[in-house]
Image (cartoon, grey):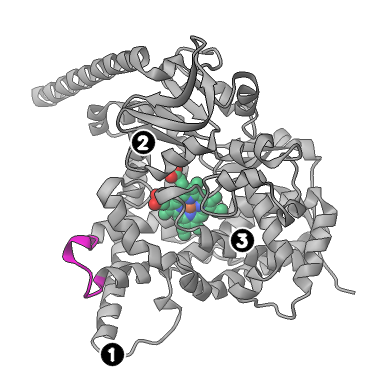
Amino acid sequence: MTVTAVNVLISLGVAALAVAVWKAIVMVIQIATSPLRNIPGPPNSNWVYGNLKEIFATENSVLHEGWVAKYGNTIKYKGWLSRNRLFTVDTRALNYILSHSNEYQKPALARYNLGEVLGEGLLIVEGEQHRQQRRIMNPAFGPAQIRELTEIFVEKAQKLCLFWRNEISKSGEPARIDVLNGLSKMTLDVIGLAGFNYEFDSLNIDGKPNELNQAFSVMFRSLEGFAIVFPLLKALIPPLRLIPDGRSRRIAKARKVMRRMGMELITKKKAEILRAAAGEKEKDNLQSRDLLTLLIKANLATDLPESHRLSDEDVLAQVPTFLVAGHETTSNATAWCLYALTQAPEVQQKLREELWSIPTENPSMDELNELPYLEAVVRETMRVHAPVPSTIRVAMTDDVIPLDTPFVDVHGQVQDSIRVKKGDPIFIPILVINRSKALWGEDAFEFKPERWESVPDAVQHIPGVWANQMSFLGGPRACIGYRFSLIEMKALIFALVRAFEFELAVPPEEIMKKSTAVQRPLVRSEMDKGCQLPLLIKPYHTV
Ligand code: HEM
């Protein structure tokens, strides 16, 4: 090693140490002075992990629900390095936090981790950059655009039916099939085509994974590996980011492939759009309907002020953003729907009868939306099995959060609002609110599509962009893709429940939920196989 390299390493080490000491001091001051310390909550379990280890070990937010029962609606618990975290189920407070998205942003740590993989896409940018991106992207996700994409959803749902029929023909009926695998392939194919007119073709029975598919697999896996110590240290202590490790090398390689192909797509689309604008007629095929084309078109609009335009870099960052945000969320949601239907055979049959009541295999968006029981089943699945069970925010300034229900602090004083200090983390309890007995009634934990015939008044106060629930969140950072995913799910359930009968292939107590960012199914006695949902599937024969 040369003297220069040694010097560089020493400087890096000193810088890293200085940042680590500085961060530690800031954190100790934060813990000692944050008003959150006066809020009641469970005892700390571990100095390093706080209460996080027990949270990760619990399914379905049961631990959080127990805390609410014991300590009340507004509590604090401990996060990394025993830092206080606010947790409230007060709907007025949650509404306030979500609607003040500038004052309550995503934590820098989560943004760094996601940003390393995705670039500056809509999921991670904040402030003016977010408003600018969202303004350009909103129209591409509107009802009229989703109507156009329904054909892709239906076609790919039918392809999944073929894929499973092929497996049944090989192993006999009923066949044991991991439905998560096929659903994940289907939603990847859909987001490829509907997102940017790219054919992953992962549902092709003989197909090999293509180059972009492989690059994305690396990216998805690296997002899951966040708990590994060195990447975590790198996220916390910026000078360490200069030291490459296996994960960052893999990500850099995958990003290179994605960048090259993404830029090719963008350049091609820009040229198509400009040619069309110059009067050369483009064929009206699916190419012009995908989200990326719509986004580029909106971005090239002549009446758009220059300051509102996105750079090519920003447009490029939306490609992996759509994939990460829209692929596994929808496939897991649909897997949980099939699981719920296996546990309620009468609901499965009633749904199947409704789906067979319309005389077409290729329903339009409006036809799908006109099926009331399908709507109720989708709502109930999203409520009970919210694929994203929680998220997190950080207070960007000192603030006072209004409350519906006052709480009693650790000094016995009644408080009718929550004081927070800049830097305080806040847990956003999506699943806890979706399953709250106080809001939904005593049967809140049960899967009952019929409840949607008349919901309690209390749920009107839940701050959600859709169906009185928080599954797609609410406020300016609510999921931009919720209409997309709901019609995709409906198209899937329509095709699958008409074509097959589903039963769980293992006893129900074997199925557990693994919660990383997305809640996925696992089989307790087959953890080595990773996430899966094995169902027994046989073709449904109409009489
Ligand atoms: C069942 C399926 C889905 C669920 C449960 C879901 C849920 C969510 C949630 C909870 C958020 C907020 C995350 C946070 O701020 O912490 C979000 C944001 C987002 N979702 Fe979805 N999503 C789904 C499908 C989709 C699809 C299909 C797309 C795109 C095609 C998509 C694109 C996005 C984007 C871009 C954001 C960031 C929005 C912003 O910050 O302005 N999602 N989603």
Asked if disc 1 and disc 2 are in contact, CB closer than 8 Å, the reply is no
The stretch of residues the image draws in magenta is: 300-311
In this rendering, the label closer to the viewer, 1 or 3: 3
User: In the rendering, at what x and y percent does residue 305 appear?
Assistant: 19, 67
Which residue position holds label 2?
246
**Helix, strand or loop status at disc 1:** loop
Q: Earlier in the sequence, mark 1 or mark 2?
A: 2
| Dominant SS in magenta | loop
Query: What residue is shown at x 41% (from left), y 45% (from top)?
Result: 99
Residue 488 sits in which quadrant?
bottom right
Q: Give the amino acid type for the residue marked by disc 3 in the picture.
A: Met
Task: Indicate left or right for 394 with 382 as reference.
Answer: left
**Helix, strand or loop status at disc 2:** helix
All told, the count of numbered labels is: 3
Circle number at residue 489 = 3
Q: Is residue 459 magenta?
A: no
Q: Residues within 10 Å of mark 1 (few under 14, many from 20)?
A: few
Q: Is residue 310 magenta?
A: yes
Q: CA distance from mark 1 to mark 3?
A: 37 Å
Q: Residues within 10 Å of mark 3 (few under 14, many from 20)?
A: many
**Helix, strand or loop status at disc 3:** helix
Asked if disc 3 is less than 8 Å from ligand 1, the answer is yes
Q: Give the amino acid type for the residue marked by disc 1 in the picture.
A: Glu
Q: Nearer the viewer, residue 26 or 104?
A: 104
Q: Earlier in the sequence, mark 1 or mark 3?
A: 1
Residue 350 sits in which quadrant?
bottom right
Circle number at residue 280 = 1
